[in-house]
Image: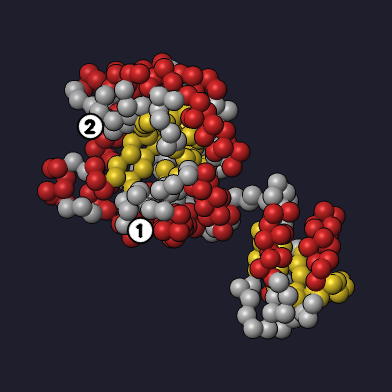
Amino acid sequence: MADRRISRQVKCGNVLIGGGATVSIQSMLNTDPHDFESSRQQIDALVAAGCEIIRITVPDQLSLDTLRELTSYSPVPIVADIHFDYKLALGAIDAGVSKVRINPGNIGSDDRVRAVADAAGARGIPIRIGVNSGSIEKHILEKLGNTAEALVESALYHVSLLEKYNFKDIVISIKSSDVVKTIKAYETIAASTNYPLHLGVTEAGTYVQSAVKSSIALGSLLTRGIGDTIRVSVTGDPVEEISIAKAILSAVGERKFGPTIVACPTCGRTKVDLIGICKQVENRLVGCTKDIKVAIMGCAVNGPGEARDADIGIAGGIDEFLLISKGQIIRKIPATQAVDQLIDEIDRI
């Protein structure tokens, strides 16, 4: 993996973004912003899944009351998602949010931009500028079209409005639903500024579509050292976003979230219930924090070789498995005892 891009560092509550800090995982509530109880329950579910920063939409003054309760309740930082109304941004800051997502060019006159910048600066709260393909300014679209270059120019335009008032605790996101455009936009802006970058693919779709698009775009960028915090967008339960985000970060070697399981897809040589055994092992390892590789292979043809780099693994035979530790065969075990004996060995590591 390439060296991480050197970016400025900002602080979102107790989470550091940029400056070499761990890449953090974000999500967004899809509950009614006026309903404290349903929002509280979704915060609990997201935190339990491993979410580290949560964004909440703030559409009107009434939602600020709920926001204030949620910022007091939440164990992780809350980000206020604001569009157009600078008074809502000021109200969210007063309500105790840890970051504001707002595009300064959309809130009106310079004095409004300055008011938000001054309020955020006084509280030590960063501002995330979020440009999507659907929100590029008309004059930029006319000049550059709906391109990666247009996303970058739009973001830098909004940045300049904050820099005008010496506000530099900025995070930038430039998302498209087009994977190639998203990658190119982030590559371009990464070379143009040292502000931390929030990665994501907007409007990525339901679970499978989002997992594919997000893995390609975010994985590609992260392997080149680009990206300081990520949000995977899923049309569905936001808790699903966290599992995809964790898988991406783990796959690129950025973070580890317990054991990594490698398993063959099975074929006609497989004489054991490998699919069922994999699911059992996954369930038994929920909550395990050991940074180990576990191999679950379906046959003895390639199994021992493929498991060589694993800390522990099993390779199937006919109603039995070989138990393998760091490439060395330990013993044969009956298929009916495979899961229990594998977990016992993992417990000893």
Front-lying residue, 200 or 195: 200
Q: Amino acid at mark 1?
A: Val
Instruction: Tell me the colour scheme of the image.
Output: secondary structure
Is residue 171 visible in the rendered image? The answer is yes
The answer to which quarter of the image holds residue 184 is: bottom left
Q: Position of residue 183 (x, y in %)?
A: 36, 56
| Mark nearer the N terminus (1 vs 2) | 2
- Residue drawn at x 21%, y 22% is 110
Q: Name the mark nearer the viewer: 1 or 2.
A: 1
**Circle 2 residue:** 105
The crowding category of the residue bearing disc 2, from other C-alpha atoms within 10 Å (few below 14, some 14 to 19, many at least 20), is many
- Residue drawn at x 33%, y 39% is 130
Position of residue 182 relative to residue 265, above or below, is above
**Circle 1 residue:** 179
Front-lying residue, 282 or 198: 282
Q: Taking 300 as reference, is 36 left or right?
A: left
